[in-house]
Amino acid sequence: SQMLIMYSHDIFRSMGILMVLFGLLTIGKMLAIFAYAWVIMRPMDKLINFTHLYYNAKSSIDRLNEILKLDSEPKYEMKVDPFKDRKSASIRLKDVSFSYDGSTEVLKNISLEIKEGEKVAIIGETGSGKSTLAQILIGLYPIDSGEIFYNGIEIKEIGYMSVRENVGFVIQSPLMFNNSLRFNLTLGRKYSDEKIYEALKIAQLYEFVSGLDKKLDTIVGKNGTKLSGGQKQRLSIARVLLDNPKVIIFDESTSSLDNETEDRLLEALNSFVEGKTIITIAHRKNSIEKADRIIDLSKIV
């Protein structure tokens, strides 16, 4: 719009000068035209800007309305705390079914049980619902039918908030904020530097962070653009370790690491996860060979 206004003035001036040269206008009339043109162009400029802002705002409002129309997750109040005074938790699924679109079932009548303190690896073909199962366990997707139990208490009796406070979830592509390493590790919670560095040592990030000029105050960039894929995964693992959950779910959380770094990480994790219930979703042999039991999700009925 600014270019239109600028070029309009040039066009008016050029036409006015030409018309004066050809005797079609007097100099006084030409100056009057310039004055009127300036008066007219300013409100036109504001009108064009308003139209531009209106369409931008309309697009934003449309996106917000799409979000507001989405169904809210069910709200369940905590009636029983199955995690209280327990080091870990058992998990049981009974006839669990789930579909994204209401017709095609990703999980159908799945029943399985994981004992308290057991380390389980979940494998299966692509599309068998491994990652979906992990997100169902923490209530990110409400199930269509069936029941989920923690320490024998159904999840509706526990409440999603309590489950998420006690079940850690490490995903393959973790979200990073355009903020410091400290914030991305703590998410605003208060932890001592000693505890943070202890988690970084287990996650095999201590040397990397110690070598940075600003250490924990280093900005990682939008969605962690200043970090490699492996560093983001290890940062996500350290983030979960700080919370010290009763149950930890690893969903392809070491897929971007080389074998040597993964071996060191898994070895360091052993002492930390001792006695905790661990669910590992992976394809790599290193990630599943230390499991107490392997569950092939594509073969579960």
Image (cartoon, rainbow, N blue to C red):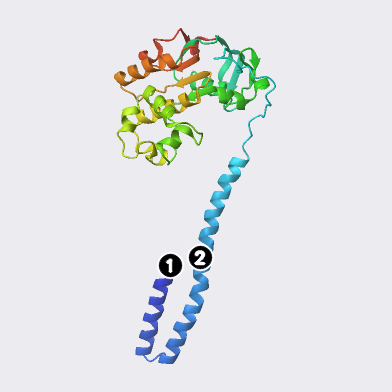
Q: Residue at x 46, y 84 (%)?
A: 33
Q: Earlier in the sequence, mark 2 or mark 1?
A: 1
Based on the displayed image, in which of its 4 quarters is residue 5 positioned?
bottom left
Q: Position of residue 233 (x, y in %)?
A: 39, 27
Circle 1: residue type: Gln
Q: Which mark is residue 2?
A: 1
Residue 54 visible somewhere in the drawing:
yes
Label 2 sits on a secondary structure element that is helix
Judged from this view, the residue extending furthest toward the top is 292
Residue at image point 48% right, 16% down = 279
How far apart are labels 2 and 1 at the CA level? Answer: 9 Å
For the N terminus, the quadrant is bottom left
Residue in the image at 45% along x and 22% along y: 251
Callout 1: SS: helix
Q: Count every numbered label the image shows and give the total.
A: 2
Q: x, y (%) of residue 184?
A: 44, 35
Question: How crowded is the residue under tag 2: few (<14 C-alpha within 10 Å), some, or many (20+)?
Answer: some
Per the image, the residue denoted by label 2 is 48
Q: Amino acid at mark 2?
A: Ile
Above or below 282: residue 34: below
Crowdedness of circle 1 by 10 Å Cα count: few (<14), some, many (20+)?
A: few
Residue beneath the point at 54% across and 63% down:
50
**Can residue 127 be spotted in the picture?**
no
Q: Residue 250: x percent and y percent?
A: 45, 20
